[in-house]
Image (cartoon, rainbow, N blue to C red):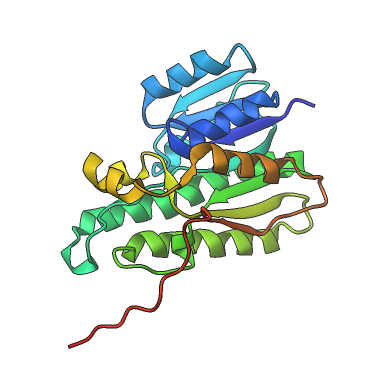
């Protein structure tokens, strides 16, 4: 059977690495993202290995998402795995210093975008049935609060609970649902969050060993490739050099 994986946010980081990992195993790829030139580059790289369909897409636009899914070409419609990867963090400052628009952008992308894509692709996953997978990319921030986490952490807590609730609804359908929650991983994440501050990115990842995009892609592929009767509900992944801090205490 032709195995099709649908990946959002495929233009960088986890999404791009995941596209490459599934291509290694011969899956057909549906890749979406906002940066068309990057999608085209990835398509050129991978189409010698597997069929690749690309679509420039802003997941926040429900009508565009529905249209894109409805217009999938023959050979890409029977989706076996949906990887809801599109998302971002902004504004690492304290909540009282953050622009409201940054909060809205995170909510619209991390929550509304996730819901838009899931709702649109779910009929195809249900048609595939047993062994189909939804893999939502959450974060340890959805479980563990930290200063500057505000809406980003809250949005990833939504991802976790949405995944669990979706799992309950789909129990009799054969469609599996997993929340993958990475910890510190060196991608473009911090550059986006700090609006291009390379020094901040270097400082965060320097002198330690963070996860890589390929590390997370391998776990995504593992979850989607398990025998049909196995569901990983949640997978929280940290580098061995990252753990929890003591409780913060404010002192006079």
- The image position of residue 159, as x and y in percent, is 51, 58
Q: Would residue 195 be visible to someone looking at this image?
A: no
Residue sitting at 22 percent across and 43 percent down? Answer: 199
Q: Residue furthest bottom?
A: 252
Q: Would residue 176 be visible to someone looking at this image?
A: yes
Q: Quadrant of the N terminus?
A: top right
* Residue 27 higher or lower than 137, as above or below: above
Q: Quadrant of the C terminus?
A: bottom left
Residue sitting at 44 percent across and 39 percent down? Answer: 63
The residue nearer to you, when weighing 244 against 17, is: 244
- The image position of residue 28, as x and y in percent, is 65, 24
* Residue 157 higher or lower than 85, as above or below: below
Residue sitting at 36 percent across and 67 percent down? Answer: 146
How many marks on residues? Answer: 0
Position of 210 compared to 104: left or right?
right
Q: Residue furthest top?
A: 48
- The image position of residue 13, as x and y in percent, is 45, 37
Position of 222 compared to 158: left or right?
right
The residue nearer to you, when weighing 31 against 125, is: 31
Residue sitting at 58 percent across and 20 percent down? Answer: 52
């Amino acid at each position: 059977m032709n195995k099709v994986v649908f990946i959002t946010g495929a233009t960088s980081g986890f999404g791009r690495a995941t596209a490459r990992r599934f291509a290694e195993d011969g899956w057909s790829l549906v890749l979406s993202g906002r940066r068309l030139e990057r999608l085209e580059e990835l398509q050129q790289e991978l189409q010698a290995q597997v069929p690749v369909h690309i679509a420039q897409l802003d997941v926040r636009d429900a009508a565009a998402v529905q249209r894109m899914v409805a217009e999938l070409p023959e050979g890409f419609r029977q989706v076996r795995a949906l990887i809801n990867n599109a998302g971002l963090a902004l504004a690492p400052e304290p909540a009282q210093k953050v622009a409201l628009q940054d909060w809205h952008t995170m909510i619209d992308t991390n929550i509304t975008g996730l819901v838009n894509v899931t709702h649109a692709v779910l009929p195809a996953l249900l048609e595939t049935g047993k062994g189909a997978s939804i893999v939502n990319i959450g974060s340890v921030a959805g479980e563990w609060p930290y200063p500057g986490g505000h809406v980003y952490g809250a949005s990833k807590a939504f991802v976790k609970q949405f995944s669990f609730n979706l799992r309950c609804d789909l129990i009799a359908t054969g469609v599996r649902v997993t929340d993958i929650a990475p910890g510190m991983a060196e991608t473009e994440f911090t550059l986006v969050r700090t609006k291009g501050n390379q020094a901040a990115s270097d400082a965060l990842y320097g002198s330690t060993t963070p996860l890589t995009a390929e590390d997370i892609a391998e776990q995504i592929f593992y979850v989607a490739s398990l025998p049909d009767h196995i569901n990983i509900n949640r997978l929280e992944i940290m580098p061995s050099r990252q753990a929890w801090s003591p409780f913060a205490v404010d002192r006079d």
